[in-house]
Image (tube, helix red, strand yellow):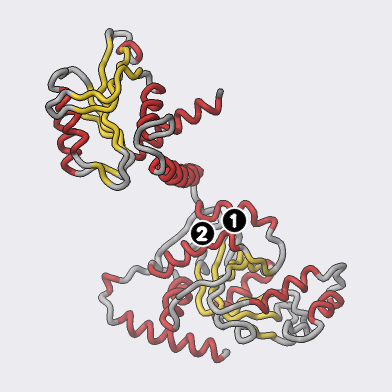
Amino acid sequence: MSDRANRCGANCDRMVHACRAIPSASLTPVPCWRYTLVSQCRTAKSLGQLGVIYNFRHDRDRTAEIAARIEADHEVSQGWGGGEANLDIREKGFVDATRECYELNTTRIPTNLSRIGDLKDGDLLVMPHMPKQGCVSIHVVDGSFPECYRYEPEDVTHQNHRVMVRQSFGMGGEISARHVTLAEYHAQLRWLRLPVLPIPQYGAEFETIVRRMEVDATAEFRPSALDEFLLGVAVELEKLFIKRVRGISASGGDISFEKLCERLLTANGYRVERRNQYDGVGGDVDLVCKRMRGNTSIFETGEVTLFVQVKKHGDMSDAEGVKQVVAMQRAQPDADGCVMSSADGFTAEACSLAKRHGIALLGKRDIFQLAMQVLADLFEQ
C-alpha cells in the first residue's frame, strides 16, 4: 500500500476514536464508502476553496478496479497510458508518442490528456458513471501538477496515468446524474467525449453538491421526477420575475407595479372603475374594481366591488395597507378587500388583521403565478 494510503488509514483510525467519544444517538449509519471517503479525508484537510472543474472520463470496462484504487490509494486513473510503453505526460514528445502508440489519426486525444498538466490543488474531477452506471462521483485534486500526478509503469490495463485526490464524494452511489441539479449536465454528457474536459458552465451545480455533502454525510441526490425539475425552473423564473418587478416604478407610466396589478386583475374578470380613492378618515385604496358575480356563478347576480391596495415592497409588507382597506370598507361593508404586494411576505400583524376582516393578501408568489397566466395568454396571441 502507498504512503498516501497509509496516511489516510491513520487518519481513519483517528476518526474512529473520535467518533467513539460521540454518543451513539447522534450518529447516523451511512454506507462505508461515504464514511471513508468523505468524513475521514476531510479531517486531514478541509475542502476549502474549489478550483477548476473537469469532466474526467474513465474506461468503463475497468470501473470496479478504478473504484477500488480510489478507495485504497486515493488515486483516480486515466487511460491511454501506453501499458508497458512509457507515455508519462511529463516527458517531452508525449503527444506524438501517444498518437503513434495507439495509431491515432490525430493528436486530439493526447493533446487533451495534456490538460492533466494544468491541474491545481482543489480542482474538481467529475467522473460520470462512477461508481456505477447513471451515477456521478466528484473528486478533489490533492496538490498541483506535477505533485498530484503519478505514472504507473507497465500497467497492462493502460491505466498508467494516476491523479492524487484528497477527497471523494458519491462513491457510494449517492449522486445520480438524473438529479434535478445536474439535469443540464446530464443532457450534454454524451457530447463530453474527451478524457479531461473543463466544464466551468456546471461549476455552480457541482459545488452545490459537494458543499452539501461536506456538511451532511447522509446527503443523497437521487433521480428526480419531472415535477421536481419543473418546480426548479419555476423557482428560477420567480426569482427573475420578482427581481425585474422590484426594479420598476411603484406607480406612474405604463411600466409600473401598479399597472401590473391592474393587468392581473383585468385578466381575472375585473374592470378598474377608479384609481387612488380616499375617504378622508384613513381609508385609502389604489384601485376600485368591479366584477359581475355571474362570471363565476349563474346563481349570483349583480356586481361585486373590490378595494385594492398596491404595495411595492422588497422584504415584508406591514399592516398599513390592510388598515387602509379596512377603513374603506366601513362605508361599503359588502365590498371585498385585497392587498397586492411584491414583498416576500406579510407581517404577523398584517396577517392577523387581514384574517379578521376577510382581506386577501397576495404576495410575490401569488403575483408571479397570476403573471404566468397572463404570459401564457400573450404567447397564444
- What secondary structure is found at the residue carrying circle 1? helix
Dot 2 crowding, Cα within 10 Å, few <14, some 14–19, many 20+: some
Q: Who's the residue at 37% across and 31% down the image?
A: 252
Q: Who's the residue at 43% across and 33% down the image?
A: 255
Q: Quadrant of the N terminus?
A: bottom right
Place residue 161 in its image quadrant.
Answer: bottom right
Placement of 224 over or under 166, stated as above or below? above
For residue 205, side relative to residue 245 (left or right): right
Q: Name, please, the residue furthest toward the bottom.
A: 3
**Res 166 label:** none
Residue beneath disc 2: 205
- x%, y% of residue 87? 77, 82
- What secondary structure is found at the residue carrying circle 2? helix
Between the residue at mark 2 and the residue at mark 1, the CA separation in whole angstroms equals 9 Å
Q: Nearer the viewer, residue 146 or 99?
A: 146
Q: Report how many numbered discs are placed on residues in the image.
A: 2
**Res 185 label:** 1
- x%, y% of residue 92? 79, 85
